[in-house]
Amino acid sequence: MGGRAQAEAELSQLAAEIRYHEAAYRAGEPEIPDSAFDDLVERYQELADELGIDPAERIDARPGEDHTVGFETVTHRVPMLSLEKLSPNRRDSSGEPMPIGDQLSAWFRRRQKELEVQELPLIVEPKVDGISVSLSYVGGALQRAVTRGDGQRGDVITKQVSQLGTVPLKLDGVDRGELEIRGELYWPLTEFARFNETLDRPLINPRNGCAGMMKRKDPTGLEATGIRSFLYQVAWAQGVKLPRTQGEMLRWLADRGGEVYLSEVFQTGSDEEALRYCEEYQTRRESLDFDIDGMVIKIDDLGMYPRLGATGHHPHWGIAYKFPPERKPTKLLDIQVSVGKSGKLTPVAILEPVFVSGTTVSRASLHNFVELERKDVRVGDTVLVEKAGEIIPQVVEVDKSKRKRGTKRFVPPTECPTCGTEAVSEEIFVYCPNPACPDQVRERLRHFASRPAMDVDGLGEVLVDQLVDRLGVRSPDDLFRVEADALASLDRMGQKSAERVKAGLEQAKGRGLARVLNGLAIRHVGETMAEDLAAYFKTADALLDFAARYVAEDEEAVETVAPAKSTERGAIEGLARKSADSIFHELNSPAVRKVFEGLAEVGVDLSVHAADVREVADVAGKTFVLTGTLPTLKRTEATKLIKGAGGKVSGTVSKKTDYVVAGEEAGSKLAKAQSLGVEVIDEAALLALLGEAN
Ligand code: IVH
């Protein structure tokens, strides 16, 4: 399978995993630690960026460290950003993988150029895997401790932090001025293990555990956890004299009673040496009493920071190095075939359990049958397993030297393993074409209830499974017909949770046509397509009426999608002829029509939601393309603002594009806009158009 197809397969797998874990989290039954969830989201975003996926097509992932109910939330004086990363997956403009060393030296050269210097001292520090904290001191006394939150606003955890006894409550020798120190709260491994032994239900891992402890409402006893801090930065200061380099700053913090790891830092003027230190540190990592998830390479001269600036995501004075994922051999016990919501059949490797990058892995996706064929993975083989982005298990390769005689090539299924219907092939994928297939039914209902679709509060995957298995729910409209008493009779449900689910369903009825369309898991209809269809047709009736005419080859309907003049684009945003055939056929099928009838019957709103749109004259009806990193807005946010003002967001630049909004590191889309003479604007100009500028 080609690089892009493989990346796309990984992206859709990641999306599925994120939705799954989000649902588990919302159901109060998280299966992975928050840090692993963050990694998933991060890897998803990285890959989606690489593939140039339209922001509106992406899943709307919640930032990992969120706000907790019951905690006071405050705005950070200086936002708590993330770090740019050296990525093993980055490719250069010709599509070749870019070695980490080349990425780092490109970063280093860019900084030399921006600063107009030859000599550029660097400092390398371990990246401690804990939770970020901001500590404000006034007159040297700790005033307030705040979590990172969403980077802009965090939760106040002063009582909790003060109780630890390991974060200085008073900075030695500082009696005046104000300053804000940033650092990481982390749980030393030995302390964590000791504490965990005292618990009936052990905590999953130190980072997760530390986050949980710091969000305990009652701080009593926190001093017994042994949680410590690791300070790395003064983010803001007034009336305090501070050193000029990061190296000296660490010493300054240490001299005032803060914890820093001076013995672990390395200073050099060469990017190559910095990288070597990072690579070598991996062996040292094993002997540390805390988890680190990489290294941070920073410019040592703090005076240069203001000149370097930042994007909305990361500052330009530092970059993170992540350790390469661990790879372990294990035995492939079986290859099973799973059925997805649109009937896609996916091979899954069943593995002899193996401990990789912090968790035990016993299943891994094999993506698709073409990929499986290419790798020639066979039952009984010894395979090497790693976690992509340190979280999704992958079978990287087969150790053919260990292959036993008599193993057989895997033969792709010719029928659905669940319902026995004859399978059909479409491009590289194989599908079960039976919409009533029990696995499809289950997956579709899970998707319907999920956050990007109908977002039914309280209706997680485990509950959906019970609804299917025990209450005979088959179709989305059935969900709305389930009685509270029936819900309350299910495992781990009571009257109260049943009522919550009923209330969640009631609320979901009003989410509008776009979300309903996305929720029905129609092939080629993702979030954006659903919104575009809803915006164009306004009601389900109009849409279904059109589908019938299109399928009957009504000239006007076909012309709407594919104008006779091939230079013109169809009237429906983003809809190509090929997907239109598939989409309208499926919409016109008796099964889908029946679902719409059922949804109307139970009172689900099947019209476009005008409430979200507050048309802005300069934006309404205009098509925007976003490229590069914008200084303050995330792509999803910019997309929402544009759409909310009645504009459209497209992934490709054409003559029909009205504006290209270019941020930092904008690539080929910017070049294309320039060659086509399309107006290029920046974030500030976009906000001005939207009337949001101040
Ligand atoms: S410098 C703009 N140095 O890593 C953020 N961060 O993605 C600048 N971290 O959550 C951070 N050890 O809390 C820096 N030696 C170190 C660090 C470190 C851990 C965490 C930080 C943040 C994340 C950055």
Image (spheres, rainbow, N blue to C red):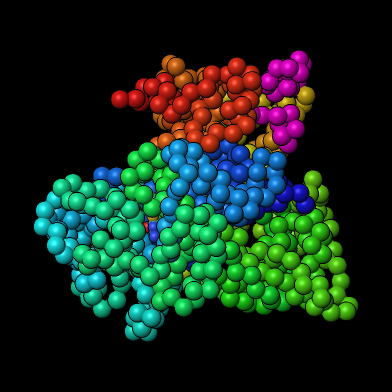
Determine if residue 301 is in view: yes
In the rendering, at what x and y percent does residue 118 appear? 48, 44
Residue at 14% from the left image edge and 62% from the top image edge: 173
In the rendering, at what x and y percent does residue 510 appear? 44, 38
Against 634, residue 280 (above or below) is below
Residue 639 belongs to magenta span: no
Image quarter in which the C terminus is found? top left
Residue at 44% from the left image edge and 17% from the top image edge: 618
In this view of the protein, which residue sits in the foreground, 101 or 222? 101
In the rendering, at what x and y percent does residue 228 appear? 30, 70
Instruction: Specify the quarter for ligand 1.
Output: bottom left
Against 668, residue 451 (above or below) is below
Determine if residue 484 is in view: no
In the rendering, at what x and y percent does residue 36 appear? 49, 62
Residue at 82% from the left image edge and 76% from the top image edge: 401
Magenta residues, start to end: 554-582
